[in-house]
Each structure stands twice: as structure tokens, then as C-alpha cells.
Image (cartoon, coloured by chain):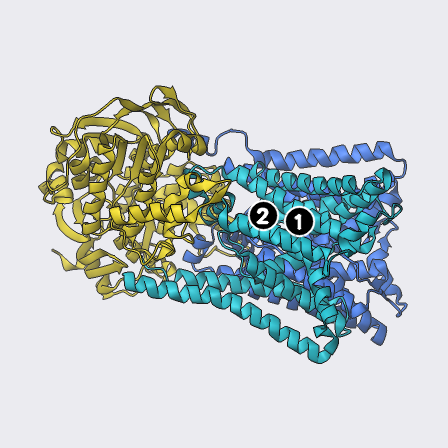
Chain colours: A blue, B yellow, C cyan
Amino acid sequence: MSSNVLNRGSARFNLSRFGELGLLAVLVVLFLVFTFSSKYFFTPKNLSNVLGQISITMIAAVGLSLLLICGEVDISIGSLQAVAALPLVLVMNATGSFWLGVLPALAVGGMIGVINGLLVTRLKINSLIVTLGMYYLLRGFVYFATGKVPISDQSGKDFFFMVGNGKLFRFLPYTAILMIVIVVVFMYVLRHTTYGRRLYAVGGNPEVARAVGISPERLKLSAFILCSLLSSVSAILLASRLSSANHMAGQGFEFQVVAAIVLGGVSLAGGVGNLLGALIGVLIFGLIQNGLGLMGVGTQYQLVITGAIIILAVAIDELKKRHA
Amino acid sequence: MNENNVILEVRRITKEFPGVKALSGVDLSLRRGEIQALVGENGAGKSTLIKILAGVYKRDSGEILFEGAPLELHSAHDSLRRGIKVVFQELALVLQLSVAENVFLESFPLKRGGAIDWRTLNRRTLEILGSINLDLNPTRKVSSLTISQQQMVEIARALSHEAKVVIMDEPTSALTPNEIRSLFEVIRRLKVLGIGILYVTHKLEEVFELCDRVTVFRDGQLVSSKPVGETNTNAVVTDMVGRSISTLFPRTHSGRGETVLGVRGLATDQKLKGVSFEVHAGEVVGIFGLLGAGRTELAKAIFGLDPVSAGELELRGRKLRLGSTSHSAHAGLGLLTEDRKGEGLVLQMSVAQNMTLPSVREFARFGLIRTKAENARSQEYVQRLAIKTPSLRHKVEYLSGGNQQKVLLARWLMKKLQVIILDEPTRGIDVGAKAEIHKLIDELAKGGLAVIVLTSEMPELLGVSDRILVMSSGRITGEFGRTEATQEKILAAAIA
Amino acid sequence: MAITATRGQTFTRALILFNEIILVLVLVLLSILISIGNPKFISLANILNILRDSSMAVIAGIGMTMLLITGEVDLSIGSLVAFVGVVTMDIINKTQSTALGVLAGLALGALTGLANGLVRTKLKVNSLIGTIAMMMILRGGVYLYRIAAVQNYHQKEAFFRIGNGYFGFLPIPILLMAVLYLVFLLVINKSLAGRYLYATGGNPTAARISGINVDRLKILTFIASSTLAAVAGVILVSRMNSGQPNSGQGFELEVISGVILGGTSLGGGEGTLIGTLIGVIIMRIINNGIIILGWNQDLQIVVSGFVLIAAVYLDNRRKNARSKIITI
């Protein structure tokens, strides 16, 4: 009884605090390792490329973090990346206007978020299963709709190309700028708005939240929609980089993002985590991808490593829970 | 009685659950600035009343009057909004948020533009904490606080909602003596603020130290409600327990054999503080304790369901491996859990399958189960224990509570056991079935088993046991032989 | 109380029997609909085709059913099937022994099962997530082992017969499926192990108290399930006649959807092989129908994804309906 009391809030080995500093350390170490193992790593070109790539991941990761914090998950965002690109490119090819294409892309994303959200909150189906089913369903749909042939961008719009590939001052990718804006905005939301704090409440103790008049269902539905919308933004940027709507886009993306943010301290159980940790997690993953690629290691290793990291991250998460 | 001073009143409240009448016609009133203790044994009805007032259960009949006007509660949120705050044992806090955020969880003060006004939030929280003399940093994460401090945060939340009634359910079970003193200080300040307080506890010394009035529940009814100055511990205890103790418990077994189970210094991280005792063959040891004493923890620790931090177990002289259920089971220990649906029965399996689960190997040849033999043996026990079931293949989840319990008992009777631990064997069972189960306990002992019965029901305890051990706060605080045991002595040890 | 109990039990028995009857009806209805679209569907050749194509999913489904009964799941079988195919073909090429190749493939399956089991019991990682991770590890792993398909350089007769041979008039895969089905039917329904499976899934605490070593049982079930999936992988590589690292995509989806459709609950403690058999065959009929009707093949995954969600939803409702019938 008393010993239980003593363990709380004391200087006892606190895994979560260790986590964030430790991650930063891992990041620095990786940075150094790659700098020394490949002469191409620490060049402006490479670094800005990495920045551009992780920006796309991070934008989606923001959305998924919101969802995880309120206690749910969405593993269909990779398939969504392929799906959202379809209306974008098709409309662009037909009308020649980028912005006209953006609208349906976002709309599709929002709609899928609504469907996921309703299936989970109304029909009470486990979100992992719902979004697993969507993962297959959407991917199959994209294969079907494109005939497994990428639909390339025929509008020839410079703007479309620049959105995903352009850089400010030849260094800072536009995608990174967008990412920074989104991260800052949502960091603010999570820390300083009622909505953000309620996400934590619903994820941490939904019954308590309900007892003070919050509707966990409404909140989660909104989080599903935000997650899908942000993934759609990410999809648009990806399409720009590929200059096409590709049926293979985003394959495995969802697992990478989950692994990255869980590594960064956003717990699968809900109610825990912040965007800073998520960002560090995404950076670590991005560095590993980039660094290994430069060392000549193939993408297959990424799959293996991602899988291993997921297991590790969740196992540590479980340990944290049991020692709390 | 000054009518204007009554803030909360319940009249003729009734609440029934399938098979159990939790509350029958309870009348209670609470005045402003009054600290009223609610006491009673487990199942007496106090928790049910609290949950009704908290908006968690809906009452079947009767009315609730709040500040003179009738009150309808549809949800927990309703209750909170109207000014009734219940602090349960499982604290209702969001651990990841700060003290201030938890206190004002319902609505945060906002700046123009929609952002949370942290300065105002923290300032107002400090004010509230100050009003109950609490020194806490409002920005600290609640997960970093002690349980005592977390309780205070819940009380602070009550104040932020301008609660007029605060109900506390067993608040001191996890607190140190110093923390209890602090809590009492806080409660006295609430009293000064004119808040009416209902204080549910089993610790009678707290009742007399803190409260103005003590109300006793028994079997779903309100037995007495008196100012503390006009009564004493004995009277309260008598009201709590006073039933005629039936002497109709069948006693045919006698004499005890060798020591079968030796428990030495058993302790766990959570509740047990070093328990030692012995049980002999053919003996029924009854273990009594009030809520939180650690009985179930003891049962689980002995059986190996929960990890043990210290101590030893000996079975007929040989050391028994701790913390391993397969070892315990194979060594000849059996455990009838308190929660028969959650931990005892496999609901989707049949009566026969549940009965034979620990012994099913006996019926197997070359790894295949011979159902004929299994059914024959099960049928024996169905008859012996008079279990009411349409067939052996019937899924056990459709049986009544009493019959389910008999199935579980049959399970252990079927196995060649050395020691059987029965945790609340007759809880939630009607009187007729209770008597049958007591007869079975007698049979078990007669068969040479060492029987441990954990119970919170006094008559049962006094009726079946050869020897009685009393637990309190994770320790054994009393031991009485059958002839010398009395209710008063036992309760005195239980609240020690 | 006994009366209410009887009524309750009859109702649920109806619900469950009903379930299997509904499934058979769905199967018949689907078959009729598809054969309207293309009469070739009902031909004996096509039926044998369907059964033979189902054999792999059914065999894997047997393992998956056992796993679900204990309350676990395995999403890595798709990647495993590919890996097994590649390894088996490669080993036979190198050792000129079909037996060794098949053994290697099965061993890989068993090892994967062991890993999955340990991740679940020792690291306490939820099996849904853990096996998704394993799915990635295996998929990456198979590409690391071999980027391109492993061709058949050995031309062994025995190897060819596994997937394409006949035992009398019965294709060997169907024979394997039938044998394994019957064996495990016995195991699940009549053996000690089967009883322990249901107890572990139905109430792990009660199982523990009764002396069952829940962790060890789960590990063994994972191993059995993966090994059965490996058998499916061996059949597949024989039929494809080359070890393709990109095979097996969506296999896990087909199997799990079929198993859940067949009435095995995600929650554990329930499940029957007959339900799995019908459920998997329905999934297979849907996929076969899509091809025979000339529809786009990719619709297969779309439909499977949809069926998964619908099946889990129905499973939820069934569980809720049953809890309302309980008398205390």
C-alpha cells in the first residue's frame, strides 16, 4: 500500500522521460553514423531530399497521432494515398487546374474518414479491423480503377511539379514548409485548445470524459476525419513527386507511420504522446531509409527493419504500461 | 429537523438486479454541512445507493429530492452538473493531463480566440486548492501524484463544479495515516463550506472520529441513522450484523489430521503484508475480512495467480513453487474464485466440460477424450449435488448462479485435491442453495481435504468454520477457535 | 429458471445452427447467381477446380481456426506462403530432394510460428500487431533471400505431383485437405488439446486455475497454424511451378475473412471447422466467380476487405445477442 504510493511521481526510473531524450540521442547517433559511412549523406542535396521525403510522412503522421492519442488507429492511410491521388490527377488532366483537382482529392479523403469513423463509433467494430479491411478494400479498388497502370500527369503544370519537388532557396522543400506549418498548428491545437486536451482525455479515460459531458464518439469521428484529410494532403504531395497517380503508392506506408510515431512515444493504448516525439520518430525512420539507401542497402531491409521496430516499440509500450 | 437545511433526500428508493434486491425502500436525508457515514457489510446496499446518486444506475422506484425539488438523473454528467460529486475508489482522472486540467475538465477557461487560458485556469485551480488547504502545483501531471493527492484533485474538481453534495466511497483504503489526517482536514473544510458529505467506510474508528451522523445499511434496507454522539461502536456493529445466527449448519466432520498447507510470511507488492498460518486435513478454516483486507489477494497468491514478493508455501512438508498455477494445480490445490463468471467458468462450454476441466486428463486415452466416461462421472456429480440442468451438454452460462457454483464445486470435488480454497462460495446465491453448498463444504472436510473458506458473511463464517482467522490490511489480526468465536470479537479484529 | 434456460439455449442453438444453414444457403445462392452469369461455373471441372483452389486456404484455415479459438490471430501467413515457396523450390534445386525441400519449407513455417508465439507470450505484444510486423519482416526477408522468382530446375516428379497430381480421380491437394481436415476435426473436437484450446480462449484464468499452461498452449497453436500455412505454401509453389517472392498477397485476408465468416469469433472460445470450411469455400467461390464472370481480378481484394468488415460486425452482433439471453 505505502510502497505503491511511494512509487508514484518519485524519482523512480521513469521510462517515458527517458524515451524522448533517448530518441533524440538515437537520432544524433544515426546522423553521425551515416555522415561517416557515406560521403553523399551530409550534402545539401541529400539532406534536403530527406527533408522533403519525411515531410510527406510527417504530415500523415500528424493525423495518425491525433487518432492514436484519442485511442483509435487507422492502418488504411497508405491505401488512401493511392486512392486520393486518383481524382487529383484525373481532374487535373481533364481541366488543367491543380486546385480543381485538390478539392475532390480532399473530399475523397474526408469521406473515407467519415466511413471509418462511423464504422468504429456507431457500429462499434474494432478500429484495427475496420481499417485493416479498408486497407485491402481501397488498395483493391485502386488496382481495379487504374488497371494497375499509373495514371500520369498530362497537364504538364509546372505548379503541380513544384508542389512536391520544388525547393525554396534551392534547399528548403515546399513540402517541408507545409509540414512545419501543419506541425506547428496541430502542436498548438493539442496543447492549447479544448479540443486537443479532450483528445487526450478521451484516449486516457473515456468514461471520465463521458462523465463530464464529452462525447467520445463525436471526438473520435472528428479525429478519423482529420487523419484521413491529412493523409490526403500527403497523398497529393506524393502524387506530385511521382508525377502520377500510382497504384502502388503508399504500399506499406501505414505501418511505417505507425511504427515511427509509436517509437516516438505516441502510445497505441491512447492518451499518451505528443507531436514532437512523433516528429523525432519520423526523422529516425527517414534517416534510416535514406542512410541505408545511400549505403546500397535495398528497400527489402526497410520492411524487415520496420517490422522489427514495430514489435520492439509495442513491446516497450507494453512494458511501460505494466510498470506504471 | 430544520427543513431548509436538508440538501439531499431520498425516499423509498428501490433497486433490483436479477435475483437480488439491492435496495428496498430506503429513506435517507443529508443536511448541509453534515458529514454522514454510510456503513454496512458487503452487499448491504450502500454502493448501489451511491451509484444511483451518481447517475450510474437508474432507480426502480422512489424519489430523489435535491434542495427540496425532485431530481431525475439520466447520466453521470447529469449528476455532476446538478452538484453531486462522487469520488469512487477507482479514481476518475485522466492521468496524462495536469491537475488543473482535471479539475476543470468539463470546461476550460478560454482566451479570446479560443485558446486555453492557462493563467486563469491555473490561478483558479490554486484558489480551489487553497480553499481546502492543499499545496499542489496545478501544472503537474496527475500521473505523478500520490493516490492521496489524486483524491484531493477529485475533491477539487467537485468544488470547481460548485458541488453541494460530495460522496466518498471508501476513500482511505490506500492511504497512509498521515494522508488520512490530511483528507479529514479537507473534508472538514468542505463541511465549513456548507457541503453535505456522505462518507462510505468500513472503518468504524473513522466514523467516530470524523462524522456527525452514522447510517447503517443491512440487506438492502436502512436499519438506523443516529447522531454519532448518541451511539457507539458496539451498537453500530450490532445494527450492521444483527441477524439470528442459524445453528442449522450441518456439522458431521470432526477431528483434524496432519498439517497439509503451511503458509509462511506470504507478502505481495500490493496488499499482503506477511501472512502465516496452517491448515490441517479435515479442517475448515474460515478467513474473514472486510473490504480491502486482502482475502482474495491471499487466495490468488497462494494459488499462484498473482506474483508473490516474499514468503513460502509448504504442502505436506514439501516446498511448493510460488507464482505458477500449473504447479499449484498439479500439486493438488484447487481454487474457487470469487468471480465465478469472469474467472471460474468457461461460459461457452457445457456443464460436463466445465466440471471436468482440471481432471479431463483422467478420461483421455491416447490423447482423445472418452466422452462416455466423462459424462458418466459428470452425471454422478450432477445427482450428488442436485444440480438443476436440462442436460450435461447444456451450456453453463444459462444456469442460475447457484447451480453454476455447484458446477464449480463439483469440478473440485471431482479432482483428488489436498487443499481447496473457496472464495465467497455462496455470494449471490439464494438461501436454499447456500445451505446445500455448506453441506458440501462439510463433505469436503470429511473427505480429508484441507478447506479454506474466505467469506464476508458472518453467519456463514461462524457456521462452517472449525477455526477462524481474521484479516485486516493485509495481515492476520485474529485467530479464534469455533467455540470461542463471537461476532464482536471477529469484527473487532477486522477493524484493527 | 430451468424453463427460461431451456428456451434461451434452444434459441441460441438455433442461432448457431442457423448460422451454418445460412452459410450453406449463401453458398448455394452465390453459385446459382454466378452460374447464371456463366454456366461453366457449375461444371464438374470447375467445381473440382474450386475445391482444389480452396484446398490451400482451407488448410491454412484449419490452423487459423485453432488460433482464433485461443483468442489469437496470425496475419503473416501470406508472406509466409511466399517465403516457403521460394525456400522449398530453392532447396529442392540445390539438393535434388523433394523431401528435403518440403521439410525445409515446413520447418520455416514452424519457426515462424514459434517466433509469433514468443512475441505474443513473452513480449506481450498483441498478436494482431505482432503478426502484421512479422508479415513485413517475412516479406522483406523473402525478397532478401531471392529478388526474382526461383525457377524449377529440378523437374522432380514428386514435387510436381503435390500440387497437380491425382490420387485416382481426386486431385492430391483435395486429398491433403481432406486428410488434414479430418485429423484436426478429431483433434479439435475430441482431444485433450482441443478441449484446452477452447478453455484457453473462453476463459484464460479459469484455464490457468485448472492447470493448463496457457502460454505454452498458445505457442504450440501458433506453430501448428504456421506449419499448416506452410503446407499450403508447398502446394502453391508446386502449382505455380516456381517460387515467387511476391505470391501470397492477400492470402491472409482470404483465410481470415473465410474463418470469421464461418462463425469463428475473434474473441476466442468459439469456432468450428465446418464453419471454416464453408466460409473459406464461399470466399473462394466469390473470387473464382469474379474471374469466371470476366470481372477485374482486383475486385477480389475489394470484396474480401468488405467481407472482413461485415463478418466482424456480424460476429459482434452475435456476441451481443447471446449475452442478452443469459439468465443469472
- Residue B3 lies left or right of residue C88; in this view the side is left
Q: Which residue is mark 2?
A: A268
**In the rendered structure, which amino acid carries the disc numbered 2?**
Leu
Whole-percent x, y for residue A194 in the image:
53, 56
Whole-percent x, y for residue A76 in the image:
67, 58
Q: How many marks?
A: 2
The chain letter under disc 2 is A
Closest to the observer, B74 or B276:
B276
Whole-percent x, y for residue B414 in the image:
33, 40
Closest to the observer, A166 or C134:
C134
Closest to the observer, B303 or A273:
B303
- Residue B315 lies left or right of residue C161; in this view the side is left
Q: Are marks 2 and 1 in contact (CB under 8 Å)?
A: yes
Residue A69 appears in view: no
Q: Which residue is mark 1?
A: A258
Name the residue located 37 percent from the left edge and 42 percent from the top edge: B151
A151, above or below C197, in the image: below
Instruction: Give the quarter of the figure containing the N terminus of chain A.
Output: top left
Give the distance between the C-alpha atoms of the residues marked 2 and 1, in whole angstroms: 9 Å
Residue count near mark 2 (Cα–Cα under 10 Å), binned few <14, some 14–19, many ≥20 = many
Residue count near mark 1 (Cα–Cα under 10 Å), binned few <14, some 14–19, many ≥20 = many
